[in-house]
């Protein structure tokens, strides 16, 4: 499974959205250089309040550009970086990947998918109704979270828009993604 990087984004502050950049640098075991979520331990404010020593399984947030197309069809205006993601991809079904998938981004960077992003009510502060638009139900009634995946950086490197994205699945049996 392969695709392309559409945009890369970061923010040094804990802001809802992140500014698009011409390049981001991923640092092994830490995350995106210059991003507020950089670090080996949790940086998300609610998680820091509970236990600041937890490992940071949310170093890099990736969203598929196909979600933005779906949201536009539902009347929302959303562009890369506006939902807080660091890497916007196209052509890779991020939500269908199992836990532990390695995503090769560009020439050297590799991130390991740790789980799903659990959307929060800040989405409705950005655009009313957006939170429910990124949630769905499958045929069994289980909640489907569509707001991207989280990852940790295994191998650092620069990532640019236009770079290739290649998914390397872990050995079977595969573990489905869960919110992290």
Image: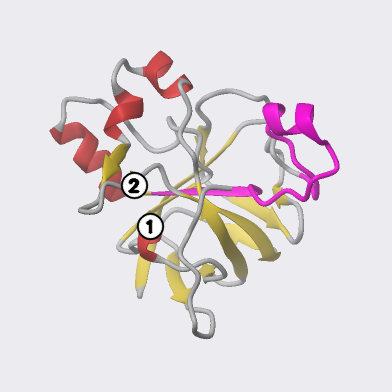
- 23 lies left or right of 13: left
Taking depth in this image into account, of 73 and 173 the one nearest to the observer is 173
- Residue drawn at the location 32% of the way across and 37% of the way down: 135
> Looking at the picture, does residue 46 appear above or below residue 155?
above
Query: Which circle's residue, 1 or 2, is located before the other in the chain?
Result: 1
Q: Can you identify the residue that label 1 sits on?
A: 95
Quote the CA–CA distance across marks 1 and 2: 9 Å
Q: Can you identify the residue that label 2 sits on?
A: 144
Q: Residue furthest right?
A: 53
The residues colored magenta run: 39-63
Label pair 1/2, CB-CB below 8 angstroms: yes
Taking depth in this image into account, of 43 and 3 the one nearest to the observer is 43
- Residue drawn at the location 35% of the way across and 66% of the way down: 3
Task: Report helix, strand or loop for mark 1.
Answer: helix
Quadrant containing the N terminus is bottom left
Residue 96 screen position, x and y as percent: 36, 63
> Looking at the picture, does residue 94 appear above or below residue 107?
above
Residue 151 screen position, x and y as percent: 59, 56
Q: Is residue 54 magenta?
A: yes
Task: Report helix, strand or loop for mark 2.
Answer: strand
Residue 69 screen position, x and y as percent: 21, 42
Q: Main secondary structure of the magenta part?
A: loop
């Amino acid at each position: 499974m392969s695709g392309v990087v559409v945009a890369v984004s970061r923010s040094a502050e804990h802001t809802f959205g992140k500014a698009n950049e011409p390049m981001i640098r991923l640092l092994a075991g830490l995350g995106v250089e210059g991003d507020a979520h950089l670090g080996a331990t949790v940086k998300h404010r609610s998680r820091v309040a509970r236990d600041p020593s937890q490992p940071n399984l949310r170093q890099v947030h990736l969203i598929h550009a196909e979600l933005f197309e779906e949201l536009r069809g539902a009347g929302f205006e959303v562009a890369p970086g506006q939902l807080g993601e660091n890497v916007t991809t196209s052509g890779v079904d991020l939500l269908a990947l199992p836990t532990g998938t390695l995503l090769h981004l560009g020439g050297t960077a590799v991130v390991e998918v740790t789980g799903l992003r659990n959307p929060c009510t800040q989405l409705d502060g950005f655009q009313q109704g957006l939170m429910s638009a990124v949630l769905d139900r499958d045929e069994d009634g289980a909640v489907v979270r569509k707001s991207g995946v989280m990852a940790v950086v295994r191998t650092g490197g620069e990532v640019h828009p236009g770079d290739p994205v290649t998914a390397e699945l872990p050995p079977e049996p595969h573990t489905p993604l869960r919110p992290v």
